[in-house]
Amino acid sequence: MCQAPLHLATVQGVPVIALVNQKGGVGKTTATLGLASAAWARRVPCLVVDLDPQGNATTGLGVWDSATNVDAALAADRPGAARELAVLSSWQHDAGAAPRVMASTTALAARERQLLSDPVGAQDRLRLALSGCDGLVLIDCPPSLGLLTINALFAADKALVVTEPSAWASDGVSEIMGTIERVANRKPLGLQVAGVAVNRLARTRDSRYWHEQLVADHGALMLPPVRLRAAVAEAAARSLPIHALPPRKGASEACAEFDKIYDLVIGSDARATAGEE
């Protein structure tokens, strides 16, 4: 099992992070689960909002056939609905800091079309549902720039762009950056870009080339990459936090990579309400 650094037992004021990219298959769910695992290892309360109708973040957290889901929260259109409709994941912890999840459902695909008929609150249903939530909130966005992703951006304090080192990745990052800027201009407190996280960096010449291209194009926004490792896929398949995997090749290195991103994106915003352990 990975050795997590000692952190504060409870926090408040940590941000809402939307993990975004309009392209599918770039690892948004992998990054979401990796950051949730880093929070789990630190015993930081965390809520994962699975806005992707595919529901991979939900099953990665060990939740199947949830009686409540994020679609119900969007339909409710009332403050604090997330607190009522989130369910406990299976990532148990001896300190009781298992993440909660607003489970996905295939009904989300229809919800996006229904939101188009709401002239008043189409873009801020999720923000309303999350009001009053405590702890870290991670929003796993669908692979599109539709109203579900827009809801996530309006609810978020920061947007973390997730990509992979492949052809046209840099163009995709630029496109989502433009969307983030447009949303930021319409929010009273703006919307910060937390950075660009490169997922599944392989040891191939092609992968290195496209990663270098991303660094050249986006410079200071680039975060340390997460390398392609079988341990990360194994953790998701077993519905386990990567930090809870038994010792095996690549597991501790993957933990360290997600811990580094967590510290850069979230760590500086955590404010303690309890003393250090």
Image (tube, grey):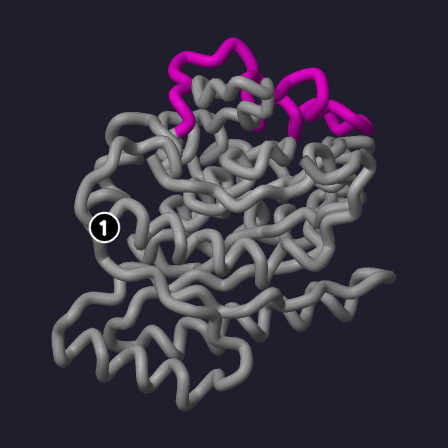
Query: Which quadrant of the structure image shows residue 8?
Result: top right
Estimate the x, y position of residue 147 in percent, counting from the top left. Answer: 58, 48
In the picture provided, is 171 more to the left or to the right than 250?
right
Q: Is residue 218 magenta?
A: no
Q: Residue at x 47, y 70 (%)?
A: 223
Q: Residue at x 62, y 68 (%)?
A: 193
Residue 46 in the image: x percent, y percent?
Answer: 61, 34
Percent x, y of residue 186: 79, 64
Q: Is residue 239 visible?
A: yes
Identified at 69% across, 26% down, the residue is: 82
Mark 1 is on which residue type? Gly
Q: Nearer the viewer, residue 178 or 135?
A: 135
Is residue 77 magenta-colored?
Answer: yes
Residue 227 lies, with reference to residue 85, above or below; the image says below
Considering the image in quadrants, where does the C terminus appear? top right
- Which span of residues is magenta-colored? 61-88
In the rendered view, tell whether residue 277 sits above or below residue 18: above
